[in-house]
Amino acid sequence: IYLPYDVLHLNPYHTMNLNTTAAKISAPEIEFSPSLQRDAKEIYVIGRKAGLTQENCVAWVGKNDEKIIGALLTSIKESGKATTFLSDGRKLTVIVLPAEDKISRNNNAFSPHEITESLNGLQTSARENLVQICVIDKEIDKFMCPVAAAIGRAMPLYHSKSSLKELAPSSGVIVSFYWANAEKVPSIAAAEIPEWKTASAVCNGVRLAAQLGDMPPAELSPDTYAEKCREIANGFAAQGVTYTEMKGDDLRQNGYGGIMGVGMAARCPPRMVIMTYSPADATEHIALCGKGVVYDTGGLALKSKVGMCGMKHDCGGSAGVLGGFVAAVTLGLPVKLTLILAIVENAIGPESFRNDDILTMKSGKTVEVNNTDAEGRLILADCVSHASNQLGDVDVILNMATLTGAQCITTGSCHAGIMTRTKALEDRVVEAGLQSGDLTFPMLYAPELLKKEFKSSVADMKNSVANKMNAQASCAGHFIESHIDEAYKGDWLHIDMAGPDSRGERATGYGVALILGLCKAPGFCSKLR
């Protein structure tokens, strides 16, 4: 499911990009296996202190190093990381996670964020050697999938460093999961349990989504992004996945004024990509709408040189729902999914839309533009309008986006801000976030109090708020919601993941695990507390 080299590096619309001639760089593979690799040159052991006994660790690395292992474990008090070399030259790293009573009710009990941070050297090691990761816990079946997502985040696919060498012949990562039992002898998670397959699917989905977010705009244009979606759909033809696309003047003629307005200045025309997965045993229909701004200059409301750097990540919402869609189809989940991606570049040129322009949206409503840098809500408004009046039987319309910086102030950099129309869906999403490790927290839902922020004298609404101190992140969500067809009777879920979408300068693939949690994939549907 990863992007092939020719799509990664050869974009005919940017022939002056020096990176088009860069050497192909492969990334280490991650395999989830119940078979322990005794020939691995490096071993990571991960778990909470209660399960990481000396006996457990000796079972993996051998009795010859019992004293070394005992000293290593003793050096870690409540939680932390320590590394040593064994008598045969292998490198052993033990990561002790915080105990459950040290974790708040708003975090996954197995600390997936801590796992990703603690694996900061894994990428380099896995290029040169075979690395074995052993994860142990008394409830390991509940944590296999969030751990898999955390490991995927620590192993990004995209690289363009000339200093990197090709992968060694025996390289990569093998991940195995173990139950800690009363006898203190770890037993491997049974190969037949479905969580193994889910772990692999979510890890691959996370790496795909993060790869899209990490790609520079000269390599990931609306054209190459849409072509990748088409390749994915073709690969799932046996599962009945379909692909349709509307671009350029077709968008204009069919009334998608938000997508067309934002993307019409770029060299590559804007697109709306639609992919469907309709299993016969589906119990629910979810529309997955994603903001796919491959680069956001801010438009004529130009960002600063500092504020513009990193705006390749502005496609994170679309990448997250695409990765979730791929993982769900891979697992054959009994949920009907319609993926709707608005793929644009918010560029500057003779055709740029301007502050003071008025756009007619797919909903039929008019929007006075007072900030061309509030573009994500414009393209998502067309997506949710399409979902609510073109698909017919949708139970939940979900839209995901790196929408506002205000989200980070509202719910922080680890938790996406969510808004829903019903408490039932809100609770379901929060629980899915806790189970998956893609954490969420509710934002204010009060359209009758907040929609006045978009009042316009000449159009139905403006696209940016009058008062930035009045729940700005929630206002942005309500702008999108206001374009849902009034006849639509299903629920709506807004996910603003501007904060958790990135970790440092890297994309995280946020959203993939959350979608699997919402779809009740094996490993994401057990109460954690």
Image (spheres, helix red, strand yellow):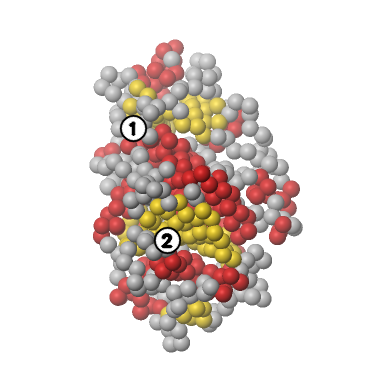
N-term-proximal mark, 2 vs 1:
1
Q: Residue 513 appears at what percent x and percent y?
A: 41, 46
Residue at left offset 28%, top offset 38%: 100
Between 271 and 338, the residue placed more toward the observer is 338
Q: Residue 75 appears at what percent x and percent y?
A: 38, 27
Quadrant in which residue 444 is drawn: bottom left
Quadrant in which residue 164 is drawn: top right
Q: Are marks 2 and 1 in contact (CB under 8 Å)?
A: no
Quadrant of the image containing the C terminus: top left
Up-down relation of residue 354 to residue 388 (above or below): below
Label 2 and label 1: CA atoms lie apart by 31 Å
Q: Which residue in the rendered view is the most extreme toward the top?
A: 64
Rate crowding at label 1 as few (under 14), some (14 to 19) or many (20 or more) other CA atoms within 10 Å.
many
Q: Is residue 285 left or right of residue 498?
A: left
Q: Residue 36 appears at what percent x and percent y?
A: 46, 22
Q: Is residue 245 left or right of residue 95?
A: right
Up-down relation of residue 60 to residue 404 (above or below): above
**Mark 2, secondary structure of its residue:** strand
Does residue 210 show up? no
Residue at left offset 46%, top offset 28%: 33
Looking at the rendered structure, the kind of residue marked 1 is Ile
Q: Which mark is residue 140?
A: 1
Quadrant of the image containing the N terminus: top right
Residue at left offset 42%, top offset 75%: 465
Between 104 and 276, the residue placed more toward the observer is 276
Quadrant in which residue 286 is drawn: bottom left
Q: Which mark is residue 399?
A: 2
